[in-house]
Amino acid sequence: MNGAQIFETLVFVPKWTESAPENFKLLLDGKGASLKVFWIIFHSLHEIAFILAIIFCWRIDPVRNWLLLLFAAHFAVRAWTLSYFAPNIIDFQKIAENPSLAKDLAKRTSLWQTLNYIRVIIFLVISCALIPLCIKLFSLRA
C-alpha cells in the first residue's frame, strides 16, 4: 500500500493540484483515474490483515501491545483521512463538474497537498514500525 501512496503523492497529486480547477477532471470517475474503489479495497484488506495480526499475536505481550499502539495510530490517520481528505476530494470533484463552485482553490489544494505529505509519512512510519515486530516474531520461532 505504501508504494501506491508514494506514487499517488509524488506523481498524481502534483498533477491535479498544479492547475486547479482544470486538472480536477483527473479526479472524476469515468473521466480520470478512479482511485476510490482501489483505496476502499486495499484499505479494507490492510485493516483486516492488521486485525488478524493482533488476534494471532494476542498472547505475545510485547508484540500485541505494539500492534495495538500502531493500529490506534493507523486508525487515527484513517479517521483524519475520512474527515478531511475524502470530503475535500469530493468537493474538488464537484468543482471539476461545476467550476463556479471554486473558492480559495490555490490555498485549499496547497493545504491538502501539504497535509497529504504528512499523512503519507505517518503511514510509512507505521509500516516501518512493523518490521521490528516481524523480526521479534521470527526470532520466537527459532
Image (cartoon, rainbow, N blue to C red):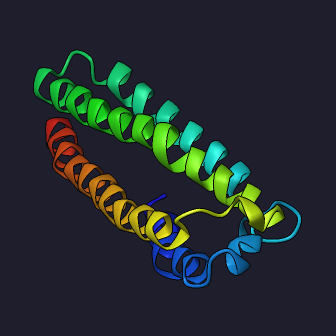
Between 50 and 6, the one lying in front of the other is 6
Between 69 and 100, the one lying in front of the other is 100
| Residue drawn at 51 percent across, 38 percent down | 82
| Residue drawn at 33 percent across, 25 percent down | 54
Q: Is residue 136 above or below residue 64?
A: below
Which quadrant is home to the C terminus? top left
> Does residue 76 appear to the left or right of 23 in the view shown?
left
| Residue drawn at 67 percent across, 50 percent down | 90
Between 18 and 15, the one lying in front of the other is 18
Residue 77 spot, x, y in % from top left: 36, 41
Count of numbered circles in the view: 0
Between 122 and 27, the one lying in front of the other is 27
| Residue 28 visible in this rendered orientation of the protein | yes
Residue 14 spot, x, y in % from top left: 51, 80
> Does residue 72 appear to the left or right of 12 in the view shown?
left
Quadrant assignment, res 34: bottom right
| Residue 34 visible in this rendered orientation of the protein | no
Q: Residue furthest right?
A: 30
